[in-house]
């Protein structure tokens, strides 16, 4: 009885979440409905989110070059080598590796991620970082890819990988974070050797082809089945 009442009370919230970035097939019975996903609910959300992102990016196209737009459309990411002039880059590396600031960290498998948020307070001690964040070429690319003209969250991030081998690091498996376009960016201070898990992206994986959408539909139906591995989970993991 209590479970029924709870479902009725939460029904309006679950319905509204269809139009948001909610992605859990387990906690929302509408998103986690195999019947609705067979009829195309998840694919509709994917297509709608992609179309809205493209519309917002057109409004922000003046923030980036035509080459940046082409690269993002074709590859799904932007790669800019030697982004900073040498003097600025040297100052940034020296600054990040020498200033002591409060950090937060979390562990996934045998890897620890440590982050220092670049807030107005911390940036007072980090002139090279502040100069980077004020660069139009930096801010413009972030805002265009994200499709929102808002201030991004920026961190100094350090990942300590392969700590003890006690658990597998899930970030080493190719995966997708969510069903809709999103933005993440990294400015690497050092080259990352292959055996230390460099960032890897599947070129073109953001393309919504007929084959990709068929895969999205199949995976969304499978995610609704609690008897299958990963069923009812929050993410559609393996990329085709």
Image (cartoon, rainbow, N blue to C red):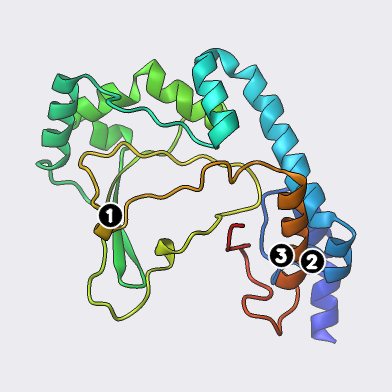
Residue 30: percent from left, percent from top: 82, 64
Using the image, determine if residue 8 lies above or below residue 148: below
- Look at the numbered discs 2 and 3 and tell me whether their residues touch, using CB distance below 8 Å: no
The foreground one among 34 and 18 is 34
In this rendering, the label closer to the viewer, 2 or 1: 1
Using the image, determine if residue 132 lies above or below residue 94: above
Q: Secondary structure at mark 3?
A: helix
In the picture, the disc for residue 156 is none
The foreground one among 105 and 195 is 195
In the picture, the disc for residue 10 is 2
Does label 1 or label 3 sit earlier along the sequence? 1
Q: Secondary structure at mark 2?
A: helix
Instruction: Please tell me which residue is depicted at 67% across the width and 33% down the height of the picture.
Output: 53
In this rendering, the label closer to the viewer, 2 or 3: 3
Q: How many marks?
A: 3
**What is the spatial separation of the Cα atoms under label 2 and label 1, in whole angstroms?**
47 Å
In the picture, the disc for residue 194 is 1
Does label 2 or label 3 sit earlier along the sequence? 2
Residue beneath disc 3: 219
Q: Quadrant of the C terminus?
A: bottom right
The foreground one among 190 and 113 is 190
Q: Quadrant of the N terminus?
A: bottom right
Give neighbour class at mark 3: few <14, some 14-19, many 20+ (Cα, 10 Å): some
Task: Determine which quarter of the picture holds residue 110.
Answer: bottom left
* Left or right side of 228 for 112: left
Does label 2 or label 1 sit earlier along the sequence? 2
Residue 213 in sight in this render: yes
Residue 184: percent from left, percent from top: 46, 41
Task: Determine which quarter of the picture holds residue 5.
Answer: bottom right
Instruction: Please tell me which residue is depicted at 25% across the width and 69% down the height of the picture.
Output: 162
* Left or right side of 187 for 70: right
**What is the spatial separation of the Cα atoms under label 2 and label 3, in whole angstroms?**
25 Å
């Amino acid at each position: 009885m209590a479970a029924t009442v709870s479902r009725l009370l939460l029904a309006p919230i679950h319905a509204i979440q269809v139009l948001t970035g909610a992605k859990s097939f387990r906690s929302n019975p509408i998103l986690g409905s195999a019947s609705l996903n067979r009829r195309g609910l998840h694919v509709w959300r994917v297509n709608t989110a992609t179309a809205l992102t493209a519309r917002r990016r057109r409004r922000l196209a003046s923030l980036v070059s035509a080459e940046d737009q082409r690269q993002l459309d074709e590859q799904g990411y932007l790669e800019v080598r030697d982004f900073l002039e040498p003097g600025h880059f040297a100052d940034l590396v020296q600054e990040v590796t020498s200033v002591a600031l409060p950090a937060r960290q979390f562990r996934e498998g045998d890897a620890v991620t440590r982050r220092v948020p670049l807030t107005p307070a911390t940036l007072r001690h980090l002139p090279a970082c502040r100069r980077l964040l004020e660069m139009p070429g930096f801010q413009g690319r972030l805002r265009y890819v994200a499709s929102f003209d808002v201030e991004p969250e920026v961190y100094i991030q350090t990942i300590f990988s392969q700590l003890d081998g006690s658990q597998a690091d899930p970030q080493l498996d190719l995966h997708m974070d969510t069903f809709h376009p999103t933005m993440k960016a990294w400015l690497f201070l050092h080259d990352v050797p292959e055996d230390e898990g460099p960032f890897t992206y599947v070129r073109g994986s953001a393309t919504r082809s007929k084959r990709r959408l068929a895969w999205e539909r199949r995976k969304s139906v499978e995610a609704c089945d609690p008897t299958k591995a990963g069923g009812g989970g929050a993410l559609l993991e393996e990329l085709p």
